[in-house]
Amino acid sequence: MHPRHSACFALASLVLVGTVARGGEVAPVGQGQAAATAPASGWTLVFSDEFETPGSPDPTKWGYDLGYIANDEKQYYTSRPENVRVEGGNLVIEGRKEAYQGYAYTSARVVTRGRFEFRYGRVEVRAKLPTGRGTWPAIWMLGTNIDQVRWPTCGEIDIMENVGFDPLRVHASVHTAAYNHVIGTQKTASVTIADPSADFHVYALEWYPDRIEAFVDGLRYFTFRNEGTGSRTWPFDQPEYLLLNLAIGGSWGGQQGIDDALFPKRFQVDYARVYQKSSREGSGPE
């Protein structure tokens, strides 16, 4: 979701409106309903959190990135229950307007790093997004070798990003050494959907040795293919881990300012699941 490191099936319905943008080009999207479906046969569930137990997120599955991270964001990430908790069958990541550790806002970022890391598979996250000027929720992945090779060489996969000043549009992207937003070459697509702050939607990714595809409620709207030219364009043959966060402001989320009257704002996640196929496509967590 742009460099985010200090070193660097409930059947939800979808009403499509507007366009899908691919690599700077715009393709029309038809009106209508697209229902999310269960994975095709051959997928095996290898990780899940249904967020059914109130309190702190399961520590065997989730850790935290804490403090200020990057991107000129205005929040301080914490692990406090005020900012992150399981409540009412959902993971709640709450952005708050409050003075804390020298910052004017707090929020949270949970990660599976060191607990669950994988290569290839299908990721599904059913979520309801916050909205309004200054919010920037994301569902994304980073290469586990980030400390060794840094961003963007480690590879970043953005399953879903949304900025609150453009509330109906969700984005999927990849960032690599050759393709990233810093040099204006990132590979990305976006689609407008029925209000993602009013309803839960299923944001999904399928990651194969030859391509990455992103979906919302079963609609594929982004494909990035392995060009076969090496790690600068395709670092995605190494394990990655999952991140869920709500940023406030920042280089993208804050482009139209922050509406302080919004807060507190909640990013709610109903479930997070990872499936994998046979050993030919990645047999299990690595």
Image (cartoon, rainbow, N blue to C red):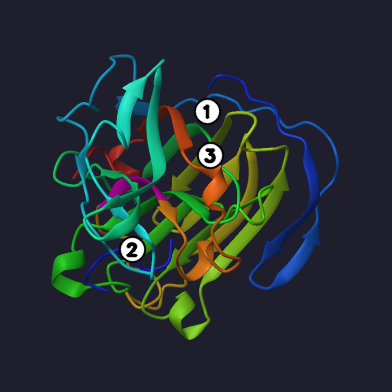
Is tag 2's residue or tag 1's residue first in the polypeptide sequence? 2
Image position of 28 (left or right of 73): right
Question: In percent of the image, x 28 and y 40: which residue is there?
Answer: 279
Q: Is residue 50 visible?
A: no
State the extent of the magenta-drawn residues as a range: 240-246
The tag earlier along the polypeptide, 3 or 2, is: 2
Where residue 101 appears, x then y in whole percent?
21, 56
Image position, residue 35 (x, y; %):
68, 27
Q: Amino acid at mark 2?
A: Arg
Residue position for label 3: 203
Secondary structure mainly formed by the magenta segment: strand
Disc 3 element: strand
- Mark toward the viewer: 3 or 2: 2
Label 2 with label 1: CB-CB less than 8 Å: no
Residue that badge 2 annotates: 4
Residue type at tag 3: Tyr
Callout 1 amino acid:
Ala
Q: Which residue is mark 1?
A: 40
